[in-house]
Image (tube, helix red, strand yellow):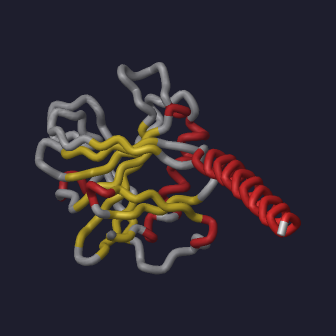
Amino acid sequence: MVQTNGRKKLIIASAVVAAVLLIVVAIVVIKNLSADTPTESTTTSKKDTPAISEDSNSTDTAPTVEPETTTPETTVDPAQTATVTIEPMAITAAYVKGIGGFDYQVSRTPSGTKYVEFSSEKLVGTKCTNDKGPFASIIESPTSDESTTLAKKTTVDKTDYGLSLADATCTSDAELLKQYQDAFSSAFSLLKKM
């Protein structure tokens, strides 16, 4: 009887040690994975500065680019992509892995168009006031005026979405800006509704 109690205690102690080790390993893995995870910042205030200006007196001029309409097919290997869920817009956006962390903010233009603006602290420059390092925006149901600034368009479940890419006017690292933009542009056709 004494021997079986000793064995039970040894087995229980071993199980507790194994569980503690598993928890420590899980915490380390989660911390390493979260280094490339985007953070969320949402706003629905109409006072926010829109990525697309409706003001005809604006000094910012974007080149007119014919948007590339995407098809459901893509040349990007889905295994090489990651996704970020934008709950206020009920969409999941894809991007090519390897660009590092970024933030996003959901806002509305003065005309009421909902959009999500992606930014990275790595792209913040010193040339523009209050620069937050924006690199791309996804616009839901863009107006005809907003469509002139889109790099790509796609339709998901009868809703149009457009990808607008920030110009390199403000950033301190134009090459890194291009990497972030290419990551979102390449995987834009993988956009899904939740």
Q: Nearer the viewer, residue 96 or 173?
A: 96
**Residue projecting furthest to the front:** 1
The answer to whether 175 appears left or right of 144 in the picture is right
Q: Is residue 64 placed above or below 9 in the rendered structure?
A: above
Q: Residue at x 32, y 49 (%)?
A: 116
Q: Is residue 114 visible?
A: yes
* Residue that protrudes farthest toward the bottom in the picture: 73
Q: Residue at x 45, y 44 (%)?
A: 39
Quadrant where the N terminus is found in the figure: bottom right
Residue 97 point in image, percent of width and height: 61, 57
Q: Residue 141: horizontal and vertical position, in percent?
A: 21, 62
Nearest the eye: 61 or 179: 179
Q: Quadrant of residue 22?
A: bottom right
Identify the residue at image location x=49%, y=28%: 124
Question: Looking at the image, which residue is at 41% across and 30% down?
Answer: 132
Position of the C terminus by quadrant? bottom left
Which percent across, then down, holds residue 151? 39, 57
Q: Is residue 183 left or right of residue 194?
A: right
Q: Compared with residue 70, is residue 14 higher up or lower down, i.e. above or below?
A: above
In this rendering, is residue 153 above or below 59?
A: below
